[in-house]
Image (tube, rainbow, N blue to C red):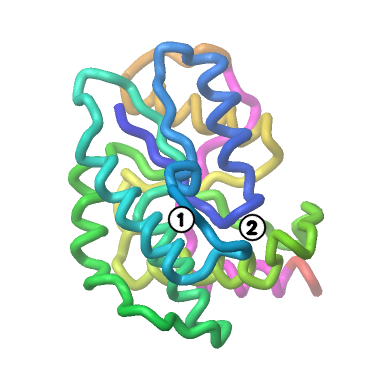
Amino acid sequence: MRIAISGTHASGKTRLIDDYCALRPDTLKLGDPFEFLETASDPPGPSEYLAQLQIAERRLHGLSPDTDWIIERTPLDFLAYLDALEALGRTPTSPGPPSPEAYLSTIRSQVDFLVLLPLEYRDDVVVAADEDPELRIAMNDALFTLVDSFSLANTDRVVEITGPPETRLARLLAEVEGRRGEAPAFAPEVGNVTPVQTAEDRFSEQRLQGS
């Protein structure tokens, strides 16, 4: 099974992957494509995100079909970063990526199960200024806009997982075991995986919580 974890920076992707692999040591992991860049500016700009987009796509095609994988980020993440930069007025100076459909086709054909980690309402994660909190939020919004735009939420291969780290891990394990028809390794007390919400659903829910 090929599991991919998508979400903005400082959303818990690496922690979830490491926790999962600790319990599933036979699963191989692929880290953030940023680790594979030969050079990068600080802070990263459009050219770095475009390069990571290309890395994220190429490596999906190179995965062994007989091995379980868990992958940090897909092309969807970097399409979202490029959209977020444009929304923030940080207009790319180089040509943008090709049509998103080509990258989404790769995800659909090469990933069995895509997990989205959203920033939650009243998120208490403290992000340092050098981690660009404005871009962090804008990328999260762009990511779920892409999910809505391409109807990725209308499939059981894409789920949104929320909650603290132990809850996310329990939900991921339960989802993977359910897809394989296995008996759960333990019985999580956290309920079912949350279906992906549309942007409108998420906005309405947050207004209710804030009232």
Check if residue 142 falls in the magenta segment.
no
Q: Quadrant of the C terminus?
A: bottom right
Earlier along the polypeptide chain: callout 2 or callout 1? 2
- Can residue 135 be seen in the rendering of this structure? yes
Residue named by callout 1:
196
The quarter of the displayed image where residue 94 is located? bottom left
Number of marks present in the image shown: 2
Percent x, y of residue 46: 46, 71
From this view, report whether residue 88 is shown above or below residue 150: below
Q: Residues within 10 Å of mark 1 (few under 14, many from 20)?
A: many
Q: Is residue 157 left or right of residue 174?
A: left
Q: Residue at x 37, y 35 (%)?
A: 3
Percent x, y of residue 65: 19, 25
Q: Is residue 44 left or right of residue 50?
A: right
Q: Residue at x 75, y 57 (%)?
A: 123
Where disc 2 sits, the SS reads loop
Q: Quadrant of the N terminus?
A: top left
Q: Which kind of residue does numbered mark 2 sit on?
A: Leu
Where disc 1 sits, the SS reads loop
- Can residue 153 be seen in the rendering of this structure? no
What range is drawn magenta here?
Answer: 187-208
From this view, report whether residue 201 is shown above or below residue 186: below
Q: Nearer the viewer, residue 113 or 207?
A: 113
Distance between the alpha carbons at the discs numbered 2 and 1? 13 Å
Q: Residue at x 33, y 22 (%)?
A: 68
Residue named by callout 2:
119
The quarter of the displayed image where residue 78 is located? bottom left
Percent x, y of residue 164: 71, 39
Percent x, y of residue 173: 49, 25
Q: Residues within 10 Å of mark 2 (few under 14, many from 20)?
A: many
Q: Nearer the viewer, residue 93 or 131?
A: 93
Q: Residue at x 71, y 62 (%)?
A: 121
